[in-house]
Amino acid sequence: MRKTRIGLLFALFLAAGARAQAGFGTTHVFTFPEGIGANAAILEDVDGDRRTDVVIATHDGQKKFARTLRIHLRRADAPMFRPAPDFTVDLTPDVVAFAVADVTEDPGAEIVLFTANAVFAYRPKAPEKDAFRKLFAARFLWQFPGPDNAIPWQNAVQDLDEIGRAHV
């Protein structure tokens, strides 16, 4: 399959991870299969190893609501990221936004998914049948998910009481 190089260059300014790694920043190019486009990305520690991982929101340009989060975990050695994602999360049509935070008692962070009426956590280390957990129901002002995007909303999750677990 012919691959299209997407001009998705990341200047990884490692605010949290910079103290553990030499150098100011690094660039990395991610490639996707033809027809797959990237529309957003966030840098957060997904697997709890204190290295900043990359979560990229992609879409299939040929299908409406064919959106996927591609999670690339940072490696301690070269290459920093593997060409293929370590895991993916297919988004249901009602997902509007996403974030990464430790919001459950499970070790490591979860992928937090926001819909117009509820908030869910995707738990990457849980068994497949238990991977998605509804955190709570809530009505949000923005109600229409985009057919080819998901909005990164990292500010929606904050550790308010400084116990190491984020609040939505």
Image (spheres, rainbow, N blue to C red):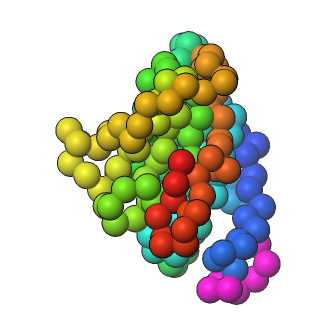
Say if residue 158 shows up in the picture.
Answer: yes
Above or below, comparing residue 139 to residue 97 in the picture: above
Q: Which region is colored magenta?
A: 19-25
Is residue 88 rendered to the left or right of residue 24?
Answer: left
Above or below, comparing residue 168 to residue 140 in the picture: below
Q: Position of residue 148 (x, y in %)?
A: 63, 22
Is residue 8 rendered to the left or right of residue 1?
Answer: right
Is residue 157 rendered to the left or right of residue 110?
Answer: right
**Which residue is found at the position 50% from the left and 30% from the top?**
138
Is residue 95 or residue 159 the one in the foreground? 159
Q: Position of residue 168 (x, y in %)?
A: 54, 48
**Which residue is found at the position 32% from the left and 40% from the top?**
133
Asked which quadrant contains residue 63, the reply is top right
Say if residue 31 shows up in the picture.
Answer: no
Q: Position of residue 160 (x, y in %)?
A: 58, 63
Above or below, comparing residue 158 to residue 58 in the picture: below
Asked which quadrant contains residue 128, the reply is top left
Is residue 24 or residue 96 the one in the foreground? 96
**Which residue is found at the position 43% from the left and 55% from the top?**
103
Asked which quadrant contains residue 90, the reply is top left
Q: Is residue 22 magenta?
A: yes
Q: Position of residue 135 (x, y in %)?
A: 39, 41
Is residue 10 rendered to the left or right of residue 124?
Answer: right
Q: How many marks?
A: 0
